[in-house]
Image (cartoon, rainbow, N blue to C red):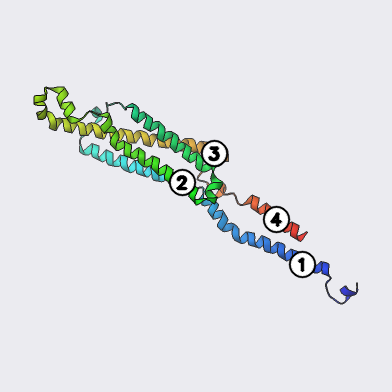
């Protein structure tokens, strides 16, 4: 055409170049933003791992303190005869169920964790409320399960001579208290490991990966990437 002979591009060519530039700008903008988005997405997989590690650290630290105290007060296998009460069984069941449900909830609501820091904080607060309640109950539980020193002394002889046995009764009470305290913590640690193991198995079955395989678990923005490519093609087309 006369326009082409003069070396001046026609309007169709100009529009095509503009559309291509817009499509390239769309793709470039997506590529520049995907790194930060993927980092946020990956971070949403780590809260349950951090919660597990922190809870186990709290239980283990408390258990080790109880172990040291047991050694200091001469607690041995003869003091482990006191059976756990129904209150302890309820506490065991509640912690095992709640910890497992909270871990499953973090996996089931991954998209919400990415989009809402409030939801992340809610999960963390709920976890620590249950964990600290369990630890607090471990301190009060032996007091509820064991008879007091004076009652122990009074059961052995007449009340008039009970005062002479109080030092020995207090020592026995402390040993029984520490024994029950340590055993309670040991059971809760075991139940935590069971809950975590069940969560890992369910996560593996549902996601075909383990919850600590963060790099592979990241979505890679496949859906957003496909949408961006379609938009770019529609602009260039």
Q: Which residue corresponds to mark 4?
A: 229
Quarter containing the N terminus: bottom right
Q: Which residue corresponds to mark 1?
A: 17
What is the number of callouts on the image? 4
**Picture residue at 22% right of the left edge, 33% below the top:** 175
**Picture residue at 52% right of the left edge, 50% below the top:** 116
Judge depth for marks 1 and 2 and give the one in front.
2
Judge depth for marks 3 and 4 and give the one in front.
4
**Picture residue at 79% right of the left edge, 66% below the top:** 15
Judge depth for marks 2 and 3 and give the one in front.
2
Residue farthest to the bottom, as pictured: 6
Of the residues under marks 1 and 4, which one precedes in the sequence? 1
Residues at marks 1 and 2, CA–CA distance in whole angstroms: 50 Å
Picture layout, residue 236 above or below residue 162 = below
Q: Which residue corresponds to mark 2?
A: 122
Task: Say whether residue 227 is left or right of residue 205.
Answer: right
Disc on res. 204 = 3
């Amino acid at each position: 055409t006369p326009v082409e002979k003069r070396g001046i591009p026609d309007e169709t060519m100009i529009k095509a170049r503009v559309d291509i530039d817009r499509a390239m700008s769309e793709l470039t903008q997506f590529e520049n933003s995907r790194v930060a988005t993927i980092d946020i997405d990956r971070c949403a997989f780590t809260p349950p791992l951090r919660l597990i590690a922190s809870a186990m650290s709290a239980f283990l630290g408390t258990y080790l303190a109880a172990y040291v105290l047991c050694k200091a007060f001469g607690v041995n296998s003869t003091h482990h005869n006191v059976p756990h009460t129904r209150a302890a069984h309820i506490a065991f069941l509640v912690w095992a169920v709640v910890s497992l449900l909270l871990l499953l909830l973090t996996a089931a609501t991954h998209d919400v964790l990415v989009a809402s820091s409030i939801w992340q904080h809610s999960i963390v607060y709920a976890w620590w409320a249950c964990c600290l309640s369990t630890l607090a109950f471990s301190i009060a539980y032996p007091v509820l399960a064991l008879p007091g020193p004076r009652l122990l002394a009074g059961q052995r002889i007449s009340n008039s001579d009970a005062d002479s046995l109080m030092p020995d009764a207090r020592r026995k009470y402390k040993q029984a208290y520490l024994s029950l305290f340590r055993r309670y913590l040991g059971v809760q640690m075991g139940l935590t490991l069971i809950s975590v193991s069940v969560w890992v198995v369910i996560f593996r079955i549902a996601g075909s990966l383990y919850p600590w395989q963060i790099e592979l678990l990241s979505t890679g923005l496949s859906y957003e990437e496909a949408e961006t490519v379609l938009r770019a093609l529609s602009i260039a087309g």
